[in-house]
Amino acid sequence: MELSLSHSSSVGISVINPHCKASSCQPKAIIPGKLNGKPFDLSLKCFNNGVSIGLYNQSFSKHVRIRQFKRNSIWACSQVGAADSDPMLNKISTFRDACWRFLRPHTIRGTALGSVALVARALVENSNLIKWSLLLKAFSGVIALICGNGYIVGINQIYDVGIDKVNKPYLPIAAGDLSVQSAWFLVIFFAVTGLLIVGYNFGSFITSLYSLGLFLGTIYSVPPFRMKRFPVAAFLIIATVRGFLLNFGVYYATRSALGLPFQWSAPVAFITTFVTLFALVIAITKDLPDVEGDRKFQISTLATKLGVRNIAFLGSGLLLVNYVAAVLAAVYVPQAFRRSLMIPAHVFLGLCLIFQAWVLEQANYTKEAISGFYRFIWNLFYAEYAIFPFI
């Protein structure tokens, strides 16, 4: 797209295929008028593959107008006509986009933030043992966790295609942007790559924890187990994997890399408990936007049984318990936490939660409002990990 401004009080806006020749341009309509007291024409010109709309001062010739557009223009260029580009590049770009959506980016952010926060905390507690050589090992650990995350969310999409066509039609398999065969290739690649990285770098115990996480993610989605059909089992699996296993495993692996035996610290015990309860809330509220599809495919969830409003209040209440507990921990164990940050941060986040619950109530629990509320809960999850290294 081209946006042109010139000293001749003329404006030109055009959407042009870059391969179109000027000779193919013919005016379709000219509308007279005035701009700053001077006459002008509003010209619509049609190209072979585009349209140009322009305001032209009548006192200048066409030749002068074109020259002044070139000299005094602000250009914003955007090519149209994707059919003219390289088909192979288009396929690669489409596949890359589908793979990214397949990974469920909001879950990757949680995994990456959590691992970085736990590593940072362990290093802050033992700053004298920091070695630059450990950075590569830490980076490989983050990659392994992202692979595990990709496997779990990927296997779920493979077995939820029918439901996702109703609840999440934008997901790549449901949208037809990624074949089931390609999805199987990706989840197998993620699982094998993650296991190899962990087994090579972090020893047998962490490899066992990692394998347990993959196993729980598998039985959550794959028949005949498909534990997601049973609300309590589904909540416990999600809370265990995203809460306990991630936090305990990353902290254990970091201390081991520093040459230290595992030992709980008050902040790490706090974040593990906090995030495990938070993961339980995510497990409860994740079904809020999916009630329609779950009912259609007879998936039993608390949202389908108790109703969206009740589950939204339940999730909000559990999170408020989390925030109140965080404030009390800072008050009663001041030697373990930085009270000047921990108390106001959690009071603020708790108030934001109350406000969002009120907004959801005022919106009468529409699907758009429910989706926004669920995204907000994930933002609170990210925020907790963001402040954790500093409390």
Image (cartoon, helix red, strand yellow):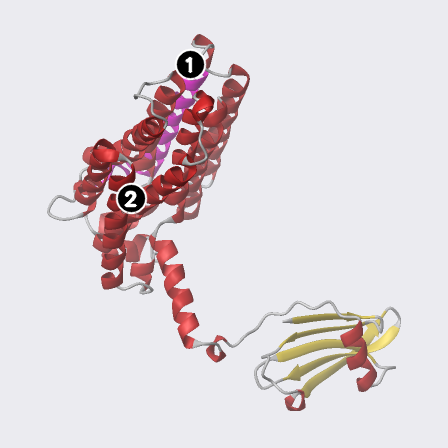
Q: Where is residue 31 in the image (x, y as percent from the top left)?
A: 75, 80
Residue occupying image coordinates x 27% and y 36%: 238
244 vs 376, left or right, is left
Residue placed most toward the observer, 295 or 207: 207
Relative to 88, residue 284 above or below: above
Q: What residue type is labelled 1?
A: Ala
Q: Residue furthest bottom?
A: 23
What's the amino acid at mark 2? Ile
Q: Tell me if mark 2 has few (under 14), some (14-19) or many (20+) residues whose alpha carbon lies within 10 angstroms of its own.
A: some
Taking depth in this image into account, of 352 and 127 the one nearest to the observer is 127
Using the image as rendered, state which of residue 46 and residue 293 is in the foreground: 46
Residue 145 position by quadrant: top left
State the image coordinates of residue 266 (x, y, percent, origin top left).
38, 16
- Residue at the image position 29 percent from the left and 44 percent from the top: 197
Q: Which residue matches tag 1?
A: 329
What residue would you read off at disc 2?
197
Residue 375's disc is none
Residue 281 location, quadrant: top left
Q: In terms of secondary structure, what is the magenta stretch mainly?
A: helix
Q: Where is residue 25 in the image (x, y as percent from the top left)?
A: 66, 87
